[in-house]
Image: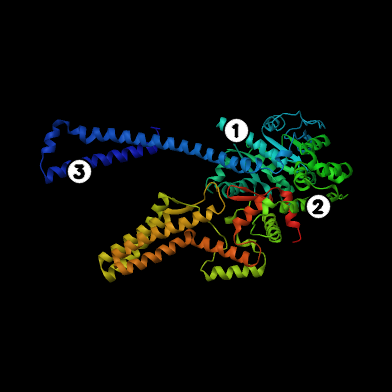
Amino acid sequence: MLKTWSFWKTFFTVYLTLVAGIWGFVEAYTYFESDSLKQLLGSNWWILYYLLPLFIAFSSTALTNAKEETRAETLDQRNRRVMLDHVENFWVKGILEKSLHGAALLELGIREDPSAVSYPWTIKKEATNETLPAGKSMLEIFQEIGMGRSLLILGAPGSGKTTTLLELTRQLIERARQDETEPIPVVFNLASWKEKQTLADWLAEQLNILYYVPKKTAPAWVNENRMLLLLDGLDEVKADSRAKCVEVINKFREQHGLTSLVVCCRIEEYTAINTKLLFEGAITIQSLTSEQVNAYIDRFGNSLASVRLLLKKDKTLQELAETPLMLSIMTLAYKDRNADELIASENLEKQRRLLFDTYITRMFERSNRVANAAFSKQQTLHYLNWLARNMIQHNIITYQIEAMQPSWLKNQLQDRLYQQYVRLLGTLSNEITMVDSLKWSWKGARGGLILGLIIGLALGLSLWLMGGLMLGLQVWLSITLISGLVVGLSSDQIEETTRPGQRLRQTLFNSITVIMLMMLISGLLGEWIFGLGLGLSIGLLAGLSIGWDYGVAALIQHHTLRFVLTRNELLPWHLVSFLDHSVDLIFLRRVGGSYIFVHRLLMEHFAEMDV
């Protein structure tokens, strides 16, 4: 600590300032009052002049430096805790623990699949059809098969791949909390990856968008190997870009060899990719056995007697029941149904559509779900169809009200209507950026003060020539102060939303705060220079002008977009009520301040519905 240049620089600055200050005080007192102070000091004058400042400077500098080091360490620990909490709250508590088919998981069979990956060495493992021993945790499987470095998880749609990934996430979080040297497990969905992006750039971008890590900090998190990456949805990448995505992941492994990865993908889509992942291991989630399916159905007694009967004669339904998701859907859709109400089909896709349609109809029939609902069945299906199509089109897994952008308006008439409204209201930006929180930067403020000094000097000199020295100085100081405030103030994103519309409320509060603050300061400065009447006008104008960029414009854009969507009957105006209604129907699930379809397959089904 004591050997750093910054320490000695601070020390000498404080020391020389104290010496000069004490010397100046004693001399001034002697000159204006008397020499009694010097007489009191006598021969010990050097203690006050040099030794006392030496002690004060050294102590204060050492204490300040120690606090800064402690603060830096605490900040690292806080960032780690916040990220672990965020991942756990969203992915584990919000999705894993509320999984629609959590009760149907039973004991999933897992088989090692060495042929699915290319090993980083020449020795290859022998393929086997044996299922791994029951009771082995995902962390143990990751350590043994993936060697704690990399693992590929494969399975059929609805087989429990994401659930398995999130169970591993839960165990990795527990390990990271117990040992601070372990990396932070962070979940990402590859659906939003674009072909021209490197994986490192994409990860940094997603850290900022999903986890609110500052843009300047995010690349360091990636490059310094702080995270254990859990990448879901390789199959959700566009079909013609999947091979490129695999190459990008392999390239990332070459450049960031110390970063561990886990990737999830549907087995059919992965098999169609010519390039394989350069991973240490791979596993395949096995289908549920007939014994597991029967044991699960037996839990419900006679209420699923019709399903049990149909399963014996419908091979297609038997195949669907081999995945936990579809088995859970069956129990919800066919519970207490008569056998003659169930339709058999030899086509797998047709049977899946029939099952989802039956599930949707059944959810509407549950009186406790739709009592006093403000939205009809037809409206709900129409809105969910539009929402599902746009979420798939924009590669969005979770839907947040505040995250909607004008790009969701694909119809030219809708887009033209939106542009007319926002231009009429004075907003030109095509991107809506919420002001979740306000932060202050002394570095930015210093830059603003320098800029204000330059601009204020030029304007002040002009006014000096026209109105006198005092007017020029007043304008110069006022512009400098306002510039420092404006540049020093900036917006930031909140770490995690806990309720829908939270960012809208925060943006409204912050915009009002900025408007009132700037109106007060600008008004006082205006009154100082020009008098009360003109000062009030200047304060009002400055407050509204600066507040415009701190939330006012974003709120106008957002509500204009909502108005256009409502006018075109694409989404209702009372959006939170509709989304909560869909949660009651078990179509969506609420995660903090966001919403997510209970499963990707159900979202795809809604998107394909003809409503």
Instruction: Identify residue for label 3.
Output: 24
Which residue is located at x 72 percent, y 28 percent? 135
Instruction: Identify residue for label 1.
Output: 174
Q: Is residue 192 visible from the viewing direction of this image?
A: no
Which residue is located at x 76 percent, y 48 percent? 333
Q: Residues within 10 Å of mark 2 (few under 14, many from 20)?
A: some
Find residue 147 and report its horizontal and vertical position in percent.
Answer: 69, 31
Q: The C terminus appears in which quarter of the rendering?
A: bottom right
The numbered dot on residue 354 is 2
Q: Secondary structure at mark 1?
A: helix
Mark 1 residue type: Glu
Q: Are marks 1 and 3 in contact (CB under 8 Å)?
A: no
Q: CA distance from mark 2 to mark 1?
A: 41 Å
Q: Nearer the viewer, mark 1 or mark 3?
A: 1
Which residue is located at x 62 percent, y 48 percent? 590
Name which of mark 2 and mark 1 comes first in the sequence.
1
Mark 2 residue type: Leu
